[in-house]
Image (cartoon, rainbow, N blue to C red):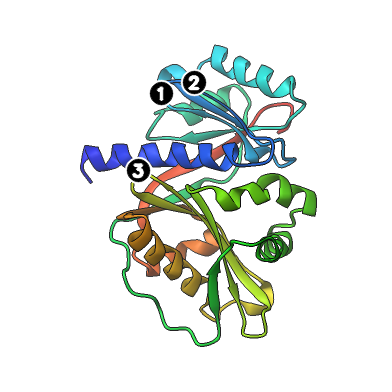
Amino acid sequence: MDANQQARLDAHAIEAHMVLVETSQEGEVERNADYVIGNTGATLPTFNFFIPLTLTGLTDETLADASAFFRTRDTMYAVSLEEHRVPDGTEYLSKRRYQPLPPQPIMVLEALPKERMAQDQLIVEEVSTIPALAAFYSILEAVFDYTPEEASLLFPSSQLQAGEIKHFIGFMHDNTPVTAGTAVYAEDVVSIWYLSTLDDFRKRGFASTLLNHILVDAAIKYNCDASLIYASPMGFALFGKFGYRLYAMRQWFLPQELG
């Protein structure tokens, strides 16, 4: 991968995090050349983050600034570290007793599909109405254990008018919502978030169909030519079948007061 492509993917990753925060109900961001802070006000620490972008962005001073930012808002937070941005950052945080969570692969797809997969059982739609948004919430609440309040905080109805973020949902023919996901568009790249399927409907190809729909939509409507995804261990094999490959690793660190 050439340097220009890597720079574009890295820029998208940060822009996508900013979009997810800024379009949330109470989103607040601070950004400079060295680090990014994002606060949604949600309970889960990883929805409120400090992301160092450079070696200068990860110092005792910047960590203290981040701690003060979230402390004044009475919000739990986590540090998101991508080792290729900040070499030796893992060791730096470990020495300061930040608690690491398991590493998470960041995967990239550099050629998006242009044709939709055939799937007779599933109807995929972009979420554009309040009832569809409620169905989207129901899947996130079932799969990720979000409360209704958290779902509406992170994904308010105002997002339906936002051009840089779209939610998608897959229905059975009886209108039962069974799979969902979110796309964020920036730098001609689409990143996929919260891809999920209800337990009773797994291993039937529904998540694959939904992912294909999102990628084709991104290529045709938004002129995207690449995709990023922060994969879970369960999703790694699925995304590999689509042609995604490992791009980098991300690791969350909890500050001492949370770890």
The residue nearer to you, when weighing 66 against 86, is 66
Instruction: Look at the picture and state if 224 lies above or below 153.
Output: below
The image quadrant where one finds the C terminus is: top right
Give the CA distance from mark 1 to mark 3. Answer: 20 Å
Helix, strand or loop status at disc 1:
loop
Residue beneath the point at 74% across and 54% down:
146
Instruction: Look at the picture and state if 104 lies above or below 27.
Output: below
Location of residue 64 in the rendering, given as x and y in whole percent from the top left corner: 62, 15
Check the image and name the residue furthest to the left: 2
Location of residue 21 in the rendering, given as x and y in whole percent from the top left corner: 59, 38
Of the residues tagged 1 and 3, which is closer to the observer?
Answer: 3
Instruction: Look at the picture and state if 48 lies above or below 248.
Output: above
Amino acid at the residue labelled 1? Thr
The label on residue 54 is 1
N-terminal label among 2 and 3: 2
Residue behind mark 3: 187
Residue behind mark 2: 58
Asked if disc 2 and disc 1 are in contact, CB closer than 8 Å, the reply is yes
Residue 110: name its quadrant.
Answer: bottom left
Amino acid at the residue labelled 2? Leu
Residue beneath the point at 36% across and 49% down:
189
**With 203 as the anchor, is 6 left or right in this view?**
left
**With 93 as the anchor, is 151 left or right in this view?**
right
**With 232 as the anchor, is 213 left or right in this view?**
left
Give the CA distance from mark 2 to mark 1. Answer: 7 Å
| Residue 155 in view here | no
